[in-house]
Image (cartoon, rainbow, N blue to C red):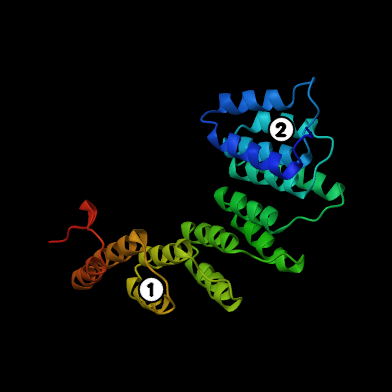
Amino acid sequence: MPPPTPAPLSRLLAAISAAASSPADLRRLSHLLLSPSAPLPPIRCLNTLLMALARHRMLPDMESLASRMPARNLRTYTTLINAYCLAGDLPAAKRHLSALLRAGLEPDSHAYTSFVVGYCRAGLLTHACRVFVLMPLRGCARTVFTYTALLQGLCGAGMLREALVVFSGMRAAGCMPDPHVYSTIVQGLCGAGRPREADALLAEAIEEGFKPNVVVYNALIDGYCSTGDMELALEVLRGWIAKGAHRTSAHILS
């Protein structure tokens, strides 16, 4: 019987990795696949295992696996870069970016977005904005995840004016905001004492088909409460309940 081809083997490995309930399970799987007595799996399968290790934040195991791979492709490098950016280890992420470039590859949108996330989480907004500006210059489209990461970073740093410019550019570029983006902007406006603007933005978004979630409504109610506009807060709450939502204990207004 011939051995399975990379695609089915990769899918099987992905299913097994997803079922692994602990780092110990994944480590055993890794040792089994990388046994010296067994042939090395194809790169597609190794990348699947690498991604599973990254999801479990098993960085030493991930690095060990990468060091044993006879060849690496773009997915290998982007997985490593993303894992280290999420872990806050930007020097390690840059090290793998350098290796990617030395291999004659070009970073993709996923790699650039990983750095936007990493820089924003580290409070390095200037660096995040530089990467954001660089993306289209390098032929990489900004995704909704790119915009969400930068908007969350800007709003979290109180840079609402800059966030609104980015948000406007997002819509102009034809990138449809998702609930995370709207939630970020609404929370930013409400946190700055501008709930009416947030309400107007939300009404416009609803006309375009957006369905607000609990986070958006909570932010808007909090915004009106913080400015003393209790009637408007109640109006939002009534509208929310009319749409079938349930009040939380944090928003039972009297």
The percent position of residue 238, horizontal first and vertical second, equals 20, 69
7 left or right of 103 in image: left
According to the picture, the residue beneath numbered tag 1 turns out to be 202
The percent position of residue 162, horizontal first and vertical second, equals 54, 69
Locate residue 91: give its quadrant. Answer: top right
According to the picture, the residue beneath numbered tag 2 turns out to be 63
Disc 1 crowd rating (10 Å Cα; few below 14, some 14-19, many 20+) is many
In-front residue for pair 178/222: 178
Residue at the image position 54 percent from the left and 73 percent from the top: 165
Q: Residue furthest front?
A: 1
Locate residue 175: give its quadrant. Answer: bottom right
Q: Secondary structure at mark 2?
A: helix
70 left or right of 190 in image: right
C-alpha separation, residue under disc 2 versus residue under disc 1: 44 Å
In-front residue for pair 91/254: 254
Q: Is residue 74 above or below residue 227?
A: above
The percent position of residue 38, horizontal first and vertical second, equals 78, 24
